[in-house]
Image (cartoon, rainbow, N blue to C red):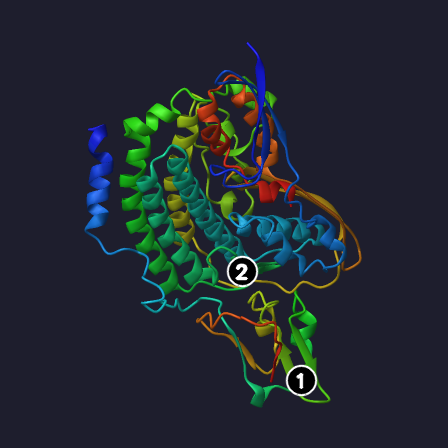
Amino acid sequence: MARTIIPFGPQHPVLPEPIHLDLVVEDERVVEARPSIGFIHRGLEKLVEKKDYVEFVYVAERICGICSFIHGQTYCQAVETIMNVAVPPRALYLRTIWGELSRLHSHLLWLGLMADAVGFESLFMHSWRVRERVLNIIEATAGGRVIFGSCKIGGVRRDIDAAGLQAMLADLGQIEADLRDLTKVFIRDDSVKSRLCGVGVLTRQDARDLGCVGPTSRASGVAQDMRQLGYAAFKDLPVEPVTHTDGDSYARCAVRCDELFQSINLIREAVARMPAGEIAVKVAGNPNGEFIARTEQPRGEVAYCVKADGTKHIQRFRVRTPTFANLPALVKMLQGCELADVPVLVLTIDPCISCTER
Amino acid sequence: MAYFEMSRLALKWALTKPPTSRYPFEPRRELAGSRGWLVFTKDTCVYCNVCAKKCPTGALVVNRARKEWAIDRLLCITCGCCVEVCPKKSLELAASHGTPAVTKDVEIY
Protein backbone atom coordinates (compact mmCIF):
# COMPACT_ATOMS: atom_id res chain seq x y z
CA MET A 1 0.00 0.00 0.00
CA ALA A 2 1.24 3.52 -0.81
CA ARG A 3 2.59 5.53 2.07
CA THR A 4 1.53 9.10 2.75
CA ILE A 5 3.21 11.61 5.06
CA ILE A 6 0.76 13.70 7.05
CA PRO A 7 2.23 16.75 8.80
CA PHE A 8 0.71 17.03 12.28
CA GLY A 9 1.27 20.23 14.25
CA PRO A 10 2.83 22.47 15.47
CA GLN A 11 -0.48 24.30 15.07
CA HIS A 12 -3.30 21.80 15.31
CA PRO A 13 -6.73 22.00 17.01
CA VAL A 14 -6.12 18.92 19.15
CA LEU A 15 -2.59 19.80 20.25
CA PRO A 16 -2.25 21.79 23.46
CA GLU A 17 1.40 22.57 22.70
CA PRO A 18 3.42 23.04 19.52
CA ILE A 19 5.12 19.81 18.59
CA HIS A 20 5.47 18.77 14.97
CA LEU A 21 5.11 15.17 13.88
CA ASP A 22 5.54 13.81 10.38
CA LEU A 23 3.19 10.85 10.40
CA VAL A 24 3.94 8.22 7.79
CA VAL A 25 0.63 6.44 7.23
CA GLU A 26 -0.57 3.47 5.28
CA ASP A 27 -4.31 3.92 4.87
CA GLU A 28 -5.44 4.96 8.41
CA ARG A 29 -2.55 3.30 10.24
CA VAL A 30 0.58 5.13 11.35
CA VAL A 31 3.71 3.18 10.49
CA GLU A 32 6.26 5.77 11.55
CA ALA A 33 6.31 9.08 13.38
CA ARG A 34 9.15 11.59 13.05
CA PRO A 35 9.01 14.32 15.69
CA SER A 36 10.67 17.69 15.33
CA ILE A 37 10.92 20.18 18.16
CA GLY A 38 12.31 23.66 18.56
CA PHE A 39 9.38 25.90 17.61
CA ILE A 40 9.26 27.73 20.93
CA HIS A 41 12.88 27.82 21.99
CA ARG A 42 13.30 30.90 24.19
CA GLY A 43 16.97 30.69 25.11
CA LEU A 44 16.28 30.60 28.85
CA GLU A 45 19.45 28.61 29.57
CA LYS A 46 21.53 31.38 27.97
CA LEU A 47 19.93 33.90 30.35
CA VAL A 48 22.19 32.70 33.18
CA GLU A 49 24.81 35.01 31.69
CA LYS A 50 22.55 38.04 32.21
CA LYS A 51 20.80 37.27 35.50
CA ASP A 52 22.65 36.62 38.72
CA TYR A 53 22.14 33.29 40.46
CA VAL A 54 19.55 34.69 42.91
CA GLU A 55 17.45 36.36 40.22
CA PHE A 56 17.59 33.27 38.07
CA VAL A 57 15.08 31.51 40.34
CA TYR A 58 12.41 33.66 38.66
CA VAL A 59 13.57 32.53 35.22
CA ALA A 60 13.73 28.86 36.28
CA GLU A 61 10.14 29.11 37.54
CA ARG A 62 9.04 30.40 34.17
CA ILE A 63 10.49 27.50 32.20
CA CYS A 64 7.11 25.84 32.60
CA GLY A 65 3.75 27.32 33.50
CA ILE A 66 2.38 24.11 34.99
CA CYS A 67 5.19 22.67 37.08
CA SER A 68 6.66 26.11 37.77
CA PHE A 69 7.24 25.57 41.47
CA ILE A 70 9.19 22.33 41.03
CA HIS A 71 11.41 23.98 38.40
CA GLY A 72 12.28 26.76 40.87
CA GLN A 73 12.75 24.24 43.67
CA THR A 74 15.09 22.04 41.63
CA TYR A 75 17.24 25.02 40.64
CA CYS A 76 17.39 26.16 44.27
CA GLN A 77 18.32 22.64 45.41
CA ALA A 78 21.20 22.54 42.92
CA VAL A 79 22.58 25.95 43.98
CA GLU A 80 22.05 25.21 47.69
CA THR A 81 23.98 21.95 47.37
CA ILE A 82 26.87 23.72 45.61
CA MET A 83 26.94 26.41 48.32
CA ASN A 84 26.41 23.96 51.22
CA VAL A 85 23.36 25.84 52.44
CA ALA A 86 21.35 24.04 55.13
CA VAL A 87 17.73 24.84 54.32
CA PRO A 88 15.52 25.01 57.44
CA PRO A 89 13.23 21.96 57.87
CA ARG A 90 10.06 24.07 57.81
CA ALA A 91 11.05 25.45 54.42
CA LEU A 92 11.58 21.90 53.13
CA TYR A 93 8.10 20.91 54.29
CA LEU A 94 6.54 24.00 52.71
CA ARG A 95 8.34 23.21 49.45
CA THR A 96 6.94 19.68 49.62
CA ILE A 97 3.39 20.94 50.14
CA TRP A 98 3.61 23.39 47.23
CA GLY A 99 5.24 20.75 45.05
CA GLU A 100 2.37 18.35 45.69
CA LEU A 101 -0.23 21.07 45.09
CA SER A 102 1.56 21.68 41.80
CA ARG A 103 1.24 17.97 40.98
CA LEU A 104 -2.47 18.05 41.86
CA HIS A 105 -3.25 20.93 39.54
CA SER A 106 -1.06 19.52 36.75
CA HIS A 107 -2.71 16.09 36.85
CA LEU A 108 -6.18 17.67 36.95
CA LEU A 109 -5.25 19.80 33.96
CA TRP A 110 -4.08 16.66 32.17
CA LEU A 111 -7.26 14.76 33.02
CA GLY A 112 -9.29 17.62 31.54
CA LEU A 113 -7.20 17.70 28.38
CA MET A 114 -7.45 13.93 28.07
CA ALA A 115 -11.25 14.09 28.38
CA ASP A 116 -11.22 16.78 25.70
CA ALA A 117 -8.98 14.67 23.43
CA VAL A 118 -11.36 11.71 23.60
CA GLY A 119 -14.27 14.03 22.85
CA PHE A 120 -15.78 14.10 26.35
CA GLU A 121 -16.10 17.85 26.78
CA SER A 122 -18.36 17.88 29.82
CA LEU A 123 -15.84 15.73 31.70
CA PHE A 124 -13.14 18.19 30.66
CA MET A 125 -15.08 21.04 32.27
CA HIS A 126 -15.73 19.00 35.41
CA SER A 127 -12.00 18.22 35.78
CA TRP A 128 -11.08 21.85 35.51
CA ARG A 129 -13.82 22.73 37.94
CA VAL A 130 -11.99 20.76 40.63
CA ARG A 131 -8.66 22.19 39.47
CA GLU A 132 -9.98 25.71 40.04
CA ARG A 133 -10.26 24.96 43.76
CA VAL A 134 -6.68 23.69 43.87
CA LEU A 135 -5.58 26.91 42.16
CA ASN A 136 -7.42 28.90 44.84
CA ILE A 137 -5.45 27.08 47.55
CA ILE A 138 -2.22 27.83 45.68
CA GLU A 139 -3.10 31.51 45.32
CA ALA A 140 -4.08 31.83 48.97
CA THR A 141 -0.86 30.21 50.21
CA ALA A 142 1.79 31.15 47.63
CA GLY A 143 0.30 34.32 46.17
CA GLY A 144 0.00 33.28 42.52
CA ARG A 145 -2.27 30.84 40.71
CA VAL A 146 0.37 29.33 38.46
CA ILE A 147 3.66 31.11 39.16
CA PHE A 148 4.17 30.45 42.85
CA GLY A 149 7.14 32.79 43.32
CA SER A 150 7.63 31.43 46.83
CA CYS A 151 10.88 29.48 46.48
CA LYS A 152 14.23 31.15 46.94
CA ILE A 153 17.79 30.07 47.51
CA GLY A 154 18.08 29.29 51.20
CA GLY A 155 14.43 28.51 51.86
CA VAL A 156 11.03 29.92 50.95
CA ARG A 157 9.66 33.45 50.76
CA ARG A 158 6.49 33.05 52.74
CA ASP A 159 5.13 30.92 55.53
CA ILE A 160 1.72 29.33 55.90
CA ASP A 161 0.31 29.88 59.40
CA ALA A 162 -1.62 27.24 61.35
CA ALA A 163 -4.99 28.69 60.30
CA GLY A 164 -3.90 28.65 56.66
CA LEU A 165 -2.81 25.02 56.93
CA GLN A 166 -6.12 24.02 58.51
CA ALA A 167 -8.09 25.89 55.84
CA MET A 168 -6.01 24.08 53.19
CA LEU A 169 -6.73 20.70 54.76
CA ALA A 170 -10.46 21.46 54.90
CA ASP A 171 -10.45 22.42 51.20
CA LEU A 172 -8.42 19.33 50.32
CA GLY A 173 -11.01 17.15 52.12
CA GLN A 174 -13.73 18.49 49.82
CA ILE A 175 -11.47 18.23 46.78
CA GLU A 176 -10.72 14.61 47.62
CA ALA A 177 -14.45 13.80 47.81
CA ASP A 178 -14.97 15.45 44.41
CA LEU A 179 -11.98 13.62 42.98
CA ARG A 180 -13.43 10.27 44.04
CA ASP A 181 -16.51 10.98 41.91
CA LEU A 182 -14.48 12.45 39.06
CA THR A 183 -11.90 9.68 38.77
CA LYS A 184 -14.67 7.05 38.81
CA VAL A 185 -15.74 8.37 35.40
CA PHE A 186 -12.21 8.14 34.00
CA ILE A 187 -11.73 4.64 35.39
CA ARG A 188 -15.16 3.11 34.81
CA ASP A 189 -16.90 4.96 31.99
CA ASP A 190 -17.19 2.77 28.90
CA SER A 191 -16.78 5.61 26.38
CA VAL A 192 -13.50 6.69 28.02
CA LYS A 193 -12.28 3.11 28.29
CA SER A 194 -13.09 2.41 24.64
CA ARG A 195 -10.70 5.20 23.59
CA LEU A 196 -7.91 4.35 26.06
CA CYS A 197 -7.79 0.60 26.72
CA GLY A 198 -5.17 -1.19 24.64
CA VAL A 199 -4.14 2.01 22.84
CA GLY A 200 -0.41 2.74 22.62
CA VAL A 201 0.88 -0.17 24.66
CA LEU A 202 4.40 0.36 25.96
CA THR A 203 5.96 -2.73 27.50
CA ARG A 204 8.01 -2.60 30.67
CA GLN A 205 11.13 -3.50 28.71
CA ASP A 206 10.50 -0.72 26.16
CA ALA A 207 9.85 1.79 28.94
CA ARG A 208 13.22 0.91 30.47
CA ASP A 209 15.13 0.80 27.19
CA LEU A 210 13.73 4.11 25.96
CA GLY A 211 14.46 5.89 29.24
CA CYS A 212 10.87 6.78 30.11
CA VAL A 213 10.19 8.77 33.25
CA GLY A 214 7.24 9.62 35.45
CA PRO A 215 3.69 8.32 35.00
CA THR A 216 4.57 7.06 31.50
CA SER A 217 7.11 4.60 32.93
CA ARG A 218 5.08 3.80 36.05
CA ALA A 219 2.09 2.82 33.88
CA SER A 220 4.34 0.20 32.29
CA GLY A 221 5.27 -1.25 35.66
CA VAL A 222 8.59 0.55 36.24
CA ALA A 223 8.52 1.58 39.91
CA GLN A 224 10.60 4.72 39.55
CA ASP A 225 9.82 7.93 41.38
CA MET A 226 12.46 10.58 42.13
CA ARG A 227 10.69 11.47 45.36
CA GLN A 228 12.23 8.28 46.72
CA LEU A 229 15.59 10.07 46.58
CA GLY A 230 14.43 11.89 49.70
CA TYR A 231 14.80 15.49 48.58
CA ALA A 232 12.90 18.25 50.47
CA ALA A 233 10.73 16.57 53.13
CA PHE A 234 10.48 13.24 51.32
CA LYS A 235 13.18 11.79 53.57
CA ASP A 236 10.51 11.84 56.32
CA LEU A 237 7.53 11.12 54.06
CA PRO A 238 7.97 7.76 52.34
CA VAL A 239 6.61 7.64 48.79
CA GLU A 240 5.58 4.37 47.24
CA PRO A 241 5.49 4.74 43.43
CA VAL A 242 2.01 4.25 41.95
CA THR A 243 2.40 1.60 39.26
CA HIS A 244 0.18 -0.16 36.77
CA THR A 245 1.35 -2.93 34.51
CA ASP A 246 -0.77 -2.72 31.34
CA GLY A 247 1.32 0.05 29.76
CA ASP A 248 -1.57 1.38 27.67
CA SER A 249 -3.21 4.81 27.66
CA TYR A 250 -5.76 3.66 30.22
CA ALA A 251 -2.96 2.64 32.62
CA ARG A 252 -1.30 6.04 32.19
CA CYS A 253 -4.63 7.68 33.03
CA ALA A 254 -5.12 5.37 36.04
CA VAL A 255 -1.62 6.17 37.39
CA ARG A 256 -2.39 9.88 37.33
CA CYS A 257 -5.79 9.34 38.97
CA ASP A 258 -4.14 7.38 41.79
CA GLU A 259 -1.36 9.95 42.16
CA LEU A 260 -3.95 12.64 42.89
CA PHE A 261 -4.91 10.83 46.10
CA GLN A 262 -1.27 10.08 46.89
CA SER A 263 -0.47 13.81 46.67
CA ILE A 264 -3.37 14.72 48.96
CA ASN A 265 -2.18 12.14 51.51
CA LEU A 266 1.39 13.48 51.29
CA ILE A 267 0.17 17.04 51.93
CA ARG A 268 -1.82 15.83 54.96
CA GLU A 269 1.22 13.98 56.26
CA ALA A 270 3.47 17.01 55.68
CA VAL A 271 1.04 19.31 57.53
CA ALA A 272 0.83 16.86 60.43
CA ARG A 273 4.62 16.70 60.76
CA MET A 274 5.34 20.35 59.92
CA PRO A 275 8.19 21.53 62.16
CA ALA A 276 8.28 25.04 63.64
CA GLY A 277 11.13 27.43 63.03
CA GLU A 278 12.70 29.62 60.39
CA ILE A 279 11.64 29.48 56.76
CA ALA A 280 14.89 30.72 55.20
CA VAL A 281 18.56 31.23 55.93
CA LYS A 282 20.69 34.07 54.70
CA VAL A 283 22.89 33.11 51.79
CA ALA A 284 26.20 34.90 51.32
CA GLY A 285 28.85 34.57 48.64
CA ASN A 286 28.69 33.05 45.19
CA PRO A 287 28.38 29.41 44.17
CA ASN A 288 31.48 27.57 42.96
CA GLY A 289 31.09 24.01 41.76
CA GLU A 290 28.85 21.74 39.78
CA PHE A 291 25.80 19.71 40.73
CA ILE A 292 22.97 17.80 39.07
CA ALA A 293 19.69 18.04 41.01
CA ARG A 294 16.89 15.59 40.25
CA THR A 295 13.29 15.91 41.32
CA GLU A 296 9.96 14.39 40.39
CA GLN A 297 7.73 16.69 38.43
CA PRO A 298 4.14 15.82 37.57
CA ARG A 299 5.43 14.59 34.18
CA GLY A 300 8.43 12.72 35.57
CA GLU A 301 12.04 13.23 36.49
CA VAL A 302 13.65 16.59 35.78
CA ALA A 303 17.41 17.03 36.00
CA TYR A 304 19.09 20.39 36.50
CA CYS A 305 22.79 20.64 35.80
CA VAL A 306 24.25 23.80 37.31
CA LYS A 307 27.91 24.71 36.93
CA ALA A 308 29.21 27.78 38.74
CA ASP A 309 32.65 29.37 38.80
CA GLY A 310 32.55 31.56 41.91
CA THR A 311 31.07 34.62 40.22
CA LYS A 312 27.51 35.86 40.70
CA HIS A 313 26.54 34.48 37.28
CA ILE A 314 26.13 30.75 36.77
CA GLN A 315 28.64 29.54 34.17
CA ARG A 316 26.50 26.81 32.57
CA PHE A 317 22.94 25.73 33.10
CA ARG A 318 21.17 22.80 31.49
CA VAL A 319 17.77 21.23 32.05
CA ARG A 320 16.66 17.74 31.01
CA THR A 321 12.89 17.84 31.16
CA PRO A 322 10.57 14.82 31.50
CA THR A 323 8.81 15.41 28.18
CA PHE A 324 12.13 15.23 26.35
CA ALA A 325 12.82 11.87 28.02
CA ASN A 326 9.39 10.58 27.03
CA LEU A 327 9.53 11.58 23.35
CA PRO A 328 11.28 8.34 22.22
CA ALA A 329 8.52 6.39 23.95
CA LEU A 330 5.91 8.50 22.15
CA VAL A 331 7.49 7.65 18.79
CA LYS A 332 7.39 3.97 19.76
CA MET A 333 3.73 4.18 20.85
CA LEU A 334 2.70 5.89 17.63
CA GLN A 335 4.06 3.08 15.46
CA GLY A 336 1.13 0.97 14.40
CA CYS A 337 -1.61 3.09 15.94
CA GLU A 338 -4.74 4.37 14.22
CA LEU A 339 -4.55 7.94 12.94
CA ALA A 340 -7.50 8.90 15.16
CA ASP A 341 -5.56 7.78 18.26
CA VAL A 342 -2.61 10.09 17.61
CA PRO A 343 -3.96 13.06 19.67
CA VAL A 344 -4.72 10.73 22.59
CA LEU A 345 -1.27 9.14 22.45
CA VAL A 346 0.52 12.47 22.22
CA LEU A 347 -1.41 13.55 25.28
CA THR A 348 -0.74 10.43 27.34
CA ILE A 349 2.90 11.40 27.87
CA ASP A 350 1.58 14.77 29.18
CA PRO A 351 3.72 16.77 26.74
CA CYS A 352 5.08 20.07 27.90
CA ILE A 353 6.88 21.41 24.88
CA SER A 354 7.63 24.79 26.51
CA CYS A 355 9.67 22.90 29.14
CA THR A 356 11.36 20.76 26.53
CA GLU A 357 12.53 23.62 24.36
CA ARG A 358 13.04 26.26 27.06
CA MET B 1 -23.10 0.98 36.84
CA ALA B 2 -20.52 2.44 34.51
CA TYR B 3 -23.16 4.15 32.36
CA PHE B 4 -24.45 6.41 35.14
CA GLU B 5 -21.18 7.64 36.71
CA MET B 6 -21.10 10.73 34.51
CA SER B 7 -24.83 11.38 34.96
CA ARG B 8 -24.42 11.31 38.73
CA LEU B 9 -21.43 13.62 38.54
CA ALA B 10 -23.22 16.07 36.26
CA LEU B 11 -26.34 16.04 38.44
CA LYS B 12 -24.32 16.56 41.64
CA TRP B 13 -22.52 19.59 40.28
CA ALA B 14 -25.54 21.00 38.47
CA LEU B 15 -27.14 21.41 41.90
CA THR B 16 -24.13 23.10 43.55
CA LYS B 17 -22.78 26.62 43.24
CA PRO B 18 -20.18 27.01 40.48
CA PRO B 19 -16.59 27.63 41.64
CA THR B 20 -16.17 30.36 39.04
CA SER B 21 -17.85 33.77 39.09
CA ARG B 22 -19.53 35.76 36.32
CA TYR B 23 -16.70 38.24 35.92
CA PRO B 24 -16.95 41.18 35.13
CA PHE B 25 -20.60 41.26 36.28
CA GLU B 26 -19.53 39.97 39.70
CA PRO B 27 -16.36 41.47 41.22
CA ARG B 28 -13.43 39.10 41.63
CA ARG B 29 -13.18 37.54 45.08
CA GLU B 30 -9.78 38.56 46.38
CA LEU B 31 -7.73 36.04 48.31
CA ALA B 32 -5.86 37.54 51.26
CA GLY B 33 -2.47 36.07 50.36
CA SER B 34 -2.58 36.97 46.68
CA ARG B 35 0.34 38.86 45.11
CA GLY B 36 -1.41 41.68 43.29
CA TRP B 37 -0.80 45.33 42.55
CA LEU B 38 2.43 46.91 43.86
CA VAL B 39 1.50 49.86 46.08
CA PHE B 40 4.02 52.63 46.78
CA THR B 41 3.88 54.96 49.81
CA LYS B 42 5.75 58.14 48.95
CA ASP B 43 5.78 59.59 52.48
CA THR B 44 8.09 56.96 53.96
CA CYS B 45 10.40 56.35 50.97
CA VAL B 46 14.03 57.49 51.35
CA TYR B 47 14.90 56.79 47.67
CA CYS B 48 17.69 54.40 48.63
CA ASN B 49 17.42 52.59 45.26
CA VAL B 50 17.59 49.10 46.82
CA CYS B 51 14.25 48.08 45.28
CA ALA B 52 15.41 49.10 41.79
CA LYS B 53 18.72 47.22 42.21
CA LYS B 54 17.01 44.03 43.34
CA CYS B 55 14.13 44.09 40.83
CA PRO B 56 14.70 41.04 38.58
CA THR B 57 13.01 42.63 35.56
CA GLY B 58 14.27 46.21 35.92
CA ALA B 59 10.71 47.53 36.27
CA LEU B 60 11.65 50.11 38.92
CA VAL B 61 13.67 53.29 38.45
CA VAL B 62 14.54 55.51 41.42
CA ASN B 63 15.93 59.02 41.08
CA ARG B 64 17.26 60.20 44.42
CA ALA B 65 18.12 63.73 43.27
CA ARG B 66 14.61 64.42 42.01
CA LYS B 67 12.96 62.23 44.65
CA GLU B 68 11.14 60.19 42.06
CA TRP B 69 10.11 56.56 42.14
CA ALA B 70 8.91 55.08 38.85
CA ILE B 71 7.43 51.74 37.85
CA ASP B 72 6.77 50.17 34.48
CA ARG B 73 3.70 48.06 35.20
CA LEU B 74 4.18 46.02 32.04
CA LEU B 75 7.58 44.83 33.25
CA CYS B 76 6.58 44.18 36.88
CA ILE B 77 6.03 40.47 37.59
CA THR B 78 4.71 41.16 41.14
CA CYS B 79 7.30 38.82 42.62
CA GLY B 80 7.50 40.84 45.84
CA CYS B 81 11.31 41.05 45.81
CA CYS B 82 11.22 44.85 46.26
CA VAL B 83 8.75 44.51 49.14
CA GLU B 84 11.15 42.16 50.94
CA VAL B 85 14.19 44.43 50.60
CA CYS B 86 12.58 47.83 51.24
CA PRO B 87 14.13 49.13 54.51
CA LYS B 88 11.31 51.60 55.18
CA LYS B 89 8.41 49.29 54.25
CA SER B 90 7.25 51.79 51.65
CA LEU B 91 6.20 49.04 49.26
CA GLU B 92 3.53 46.40 49.59
CA LEU B 93 1.64 44.03 47.36
CA ALA B 94 -2.12 44.53 47.48
CA ALA B 95 -4.39 41.50 47.19
CA SER B 96 -6.18 43.24 44.32
CA HIS B 97 -4.78 42.87 40.83
CA GLY B 98 -5.52 46.48 39.93
CA THR B 99 -6.53 47.74 36.54
CA PRO B 100 -5.04 46.42 33.30
CA ALA B 101 -2.28 48.52 31.74
CA VAL B 102 -3.47 49.78 28.36
CA THR B 103 -0.58 52.14 27.57
CA LYS B 104 3.17 51.78 27.85
CA ASP B 105 3.47 54.73 30.22
CA VAL B 106 5.82 54.58 33.18
CA GLU B 107 4.10 55.62 36.40
CA ILE B 108 6.16 58.25 38.23
CA TYR B 109 5.57 59.11 41.88
Q: Are marks 2 and 1 in contact (CB under 8 Å)?
A: no
Give coordinates of residue A82: x percent, y percent. Answer: 71, 50
Relative vertical location of residue A283 with respect to residue B90 in this rendering, above or below = above
Residue bearing the label numbered 1: B47
**Residue at coordinates 61% horizontally, 35% vertically from top-left?**
A324
Give coordinates of residue A347: x percent, y percent. Answer: 48, 34
Cα distance between the residues tagged 2 and 1: 26 Å
Mark 2 falls on what kind of element? loop
Relative vertical location of residue A268 with respect to residue B36 in this rendering, above or below = above
Q: Quadrant of residue A87?
A: bottom right
Relative vertical location of residue A199 with respect to residue A63 in this rendering, above or below = above
In the image, what residue type sits under mark 1? Tyr
Q: Are marks 2 and 1 on the same chain?
A: no
Q: Residue lying farthest top?
A: A1
- Quadrant containing the N terminus of chain A is top right
**Residue at coordinates 28% horizontally, 50% vertically from top-left?**
A174
Residue bearing the label numbered 2: A150
In the image, what residue type sits under mark 2? Ser
**Residue at coordinates 48% horizontally, 28% vertically from top-left?**
A345
Q: Nearer the viewer, residue A282 or B39?
A: B39
